Amino acid sequence: MEENRNRNEKQASQKADQSAENRPGMHQKKAALINDLSGLGRCSLSVQLPVLSVMQIECLLLPTCVLSNHTGYPSFYLRDLTEDLDLMMEEWKKQKVEIDAIVTGFLSSEKQIHHVLHFLDLFQKPDTLVVVDPVMGDHGKAYPTITPALQKAMRTLTDRADVLLPNLTEACLLTDTEWKEHFLRTEIEAMAIQLTEMGARKVVISGIEEGQNICDCTLEKGSQVHWIESKKSAQMRSGTGDLFCAVLTGALLHEKSLEQAARMAGDFVRKALEVTKKLHVPDEEGTAFEMVLCDLCWQCEAKGQEEGGF
């Protein structure tokens, strides 16, 4: 038994060495995650870190605030870190950190958005992937923290996005479109086009409900709109947007197309929701994504066998 284990470990090590030799200049990619950290409730950094880690991405964390639990619980404690952000950025700059992707999530104020813009000025390079999840609302309503000033500042951040990931509510807020319960596809496509005109290079409007289906509308600037459909298996809950964002970012960093990345992210979220429903997880506890996290590992392994990496 011990002999077999040692042999397997040696073979795995040899494979890794051969893979590195076959890909000169290879390096592990790094993603800076700018989001809140909630101790309970499985959302934001607490779900994005493990997802991107199994996708072989090194995560650099810049928390915007720390919460005892997310705001969907009856009560919560929040420690705002706005005044610490620039100090943390300057330390990173001293360390000469180089970043392949910058991912933004929940930002609690206009001031935090300006800090993020400063972060982009410090660390964004021509080939840095900037993914903006404009967390502002859901189900037709803005979150209580969303002020007109924050909404305006979020549009400025949209201009810096390589990939913008609003849900339908957030797309309406960004484009000043009046909310209604049912939108035609042509109306949603018009919003996606408008968002590219505002500066975003790629747009995915996610989680659009159409009867028994859940859909995503994807658009690359100057290209045709694509729709991705799947059967709605369970109701969305806290953290699903963060999961979608993390998987999509990881896939893009491994050179998937926007449509492929969005499909991969949607499939992962759907599987996680199905397992969560079977486990009867309370809504406030988020999604039991850990139960299907190995699906991403297997995809990495399959890709590795083909190309020596994800």
Image: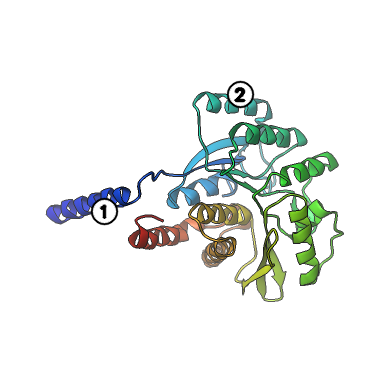
- Dividing the picture into quadrants, the one containing residue 127 is top right
**Residue name at image x 60 percent, y 52 percent:** 242
Please give left or right for residue 23 compared with residue 40 in the image.
left
Per the model, the C-alpha gap separating discs 2 and 1 is: 42 Å
- Give coordinates of residue 283: x percent, y percent: 62, 57
The residue under label 1 is 15
Q: In this view, does 27 lie above or below 266?
A: above
Say which of marks 2 and 1 sits in front.
1
Amino acid at circle 2: Leu
**Residue name at image x 19 percent, y 50 percent:** 10
- Dividing the picture into quadrants, the one containing residue 36 is top right
Please give left or right for residue 32 compared with residue 210 in the image.
left
- Dividing the picture into quadrants, the one containing residue 184 is bottom right
Q: In this view, does 199 lie above or below 191?
A: above
User: 31 or 20, which is in the foreground?
Assistant: 20
Q: Is residue 21 above or below residue 140?
A: above
Q: Is residue 63 visible?
A: yes
User: 121 or 184, which is in the foreground?
Assistant: 121
Image quadrant containing the C terminus:
bottom left
Amino acid at circle 1: Lys
Determine whether the residue tagged by mark 1 lies in a helix, strand or loop. Answer: helix
The residue under label 2 is 87
- Give coordinates of residue 52: x percent, y percent: 49, 49
